[in-house]
Image: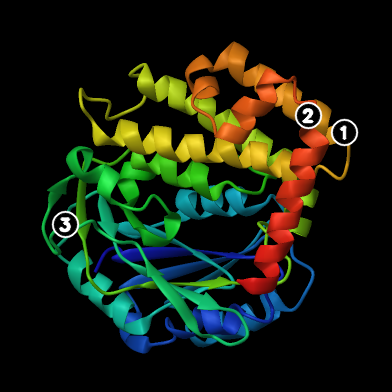
Amino acid sequence: MDRPLLTVSVAAYNVEKYIEKTLECFQDPALAGLVEVLVTDDGGSDSTTEKAGRIAEEYPEIFTLCHKENGGWGSTVNYGLARARGKYFKLLDGDDWFDKEGLNGLLEYLAGADTDLVYTPYRVIEDGTMAQLSVGGGTGGLPFNERLDFHKVADRLEPTMHCMTFRTEALKGNVEILEHCFYTDVEYTMRSFCCVDSVCCLEKPLYCYRVGRSGQSMSVAGVRKHHEDHLRVVKSLLSFRDEFRNGKAKGVLEGDKLLQVMDYRVGGMVNSQYFIYYLLGDDRSFQARVREFDRFLKENHPDMYKDRPVFVRINRLIGFHCFPLMSLGIRTINRIKKLYY
């Protein structure tokens, strides 16, 4: 076989506790020639590289350990995609893993596949207990193992990287995402979606997504540390959405369901930006920040400005003067959720 069926790009930054589990399902001599796993050390400081290196030495036909200066999650995506040799390309975070049965099912399909996107369900796993909390990646009743027109069904698929395996050549030269920045998984998904014309849905879950790990970027502490990154991604997505809607991005057709997905996903990120400001509102500087962001939307993206949550629209009417009180309410609700959910 001249090229592998699948390239898996693993972002491995300070995940020494998890990396062996992440790479476990690929440690099978039968996968040699079928799968290449690019493990990208993003300038970490723990023993992740040593642990991954020992595995790569044992299975050199499967694993390649790559070293680079720290550039954030987005840089590992760009780095992996540029070096991918596989027919298809999939991301895997260094603290997650693939279901072995799901991987075998994917490879069986990829052997004869020609769709731009292969869509698979994913399992949500609680860190520590390893209990399965849910299964994501529903298909809205779409048939399995059939080639479908992506532009007609995009709104029935969950727009998350965990479900997505893309045809490599569809992405190369078309997808590059922000570096030195958190929250770029949404940007990767939306930019990649715009390179897709066809999709096939498979039934078996593949990706196992670990949640509840200390230090994850969507924890309150993570949000406080990286809120500027979230804003940077939101502005990048808003600009890309405008290009998309103006027909400059690939795949814009009359009645295209991808337009709905773009509006939904980017709108969700905009809502999250407002929520972040209120969540961090114990720092009064965020009152000025939310006003500034609201003004930016109104001046640059008026359609996105209009369709915002009720609490935002009410606060606009009074010049965001109730921001401290509203922020206190949101932070209280968030603490209650932590206690009981």
Residue bearing mark 2: 289
Q: Which residue is found at the position 53% from the left and 47% from the top?
A: 78
Q: How crowded is mark 3: few (under 14 residues within 10 Å), some or many (20 or more)?
A: some
Residue bearing mark 3: 142
Give the image location of residue 272, x and y in percent.
60, 42
| The C terminus lies in quadrant | bottom right
Would residue 278 be found to the left or right of residue 52 on screen? right
Q: What residue type is labelled 2?
A: Arg
Is 15 drawn above or below residue 277 in the view shown? below
- Marks 1,2: beta carbons within 8 A: yes
Is 257 drawn above or below residue 156 in the view shown? above
Q: Which residue is found at the position 64% from the left and 38% from the top?
A: 273
Residue 203 visible in the current orientation: yes
Secondary structure at numbered mark 2: helix
The numbered dot on residue 148 is none
Would residue 228 be found to the left or right of residue 209 on screen? right
Q: Which of 97 and 304 is in front in this view?
A: 304
Residue 173 visible in the current orientation: no
C-alpha distance separating marks 1 and 3? 47 Å
Give the image location of residue 244, x and y in percent.
38, 24
